[in-house]
Amino acid sequence: MLSVVEKSYSKTGLKDIGEWGFGRNWPVVYIIYNKTKAYVGETIDAVRRTEQHLQEHEFAEFTGFSICLISSSTLLRMLRKLSHGIMSVQNKHGRQNDLKMM
């Protein structure tokens, strides 16, 4: 099953995530992004984790937010195919994944 939910990366989007059935106590992969960069993370509480990101200075440049009911390795493979090398993806360990086609 693949389900992707798009939300605003804002306090309003956070409220929407809280009302979504998979926003808490459910394993999700999420993507916070802008036109050139994306951060990919995994959590079992998207509401709590989004609250944390919204308070962190390093995430202020992002504008979009997607939540995926999918494994992170599958998601990264999909992003590689879709990005055509124009986007970099960073995870919580500061590692960047080059998304050029393999």
Image (cartoon, rainbow, N blue to C red):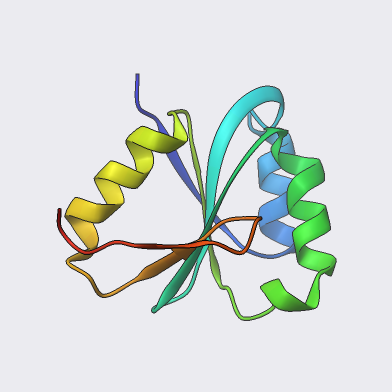
**In which quadrant of the rendered image does the N terminus lie?**
top left
Q: Is residue 37 left or right of residue 48?
A: left
Between residue 54 and residue 20, name the one nearer to us: 54
Q: Is residue 36 left or right of residue 8?
A: left
- Residue at image coords 69%, 65%: 10
One can see residue 21 in this view:
no
- Residue 58, placed above or below residue 12: below
In the rendered image, which quarter is residue 28 located in? top right
- Residue at image coords 29%, 52%: 79
How many numbered markers are drawn? 0
- Residue 65, placed above or below residue 69: below
- Residue at image coords 62%, 25%: 27
One can see residue 6 in this view:
yes
Between residue 92 and residue 30, name the one nearer to us: 92
Between residue 5 and residue 35, name the one nearer to us: 35
- Residue 75, placed above or below residue 3: below
- Residue at image coords 35%, 27%: 2
Location of residue 5 in the rendering, given as x and y in whole percent from the top left corner = 47, 42
Location of residue 34 in the rendering, given as x and y in whole percent from the top left corner = 47, 74
- Residue 59, placed above or below residue 99: below
In the rendered image, which quarter is residue 11 located in? bottom right
Location of residue 40 in the rendering, given as x and y in whole percent from the top left corner = 52, 52
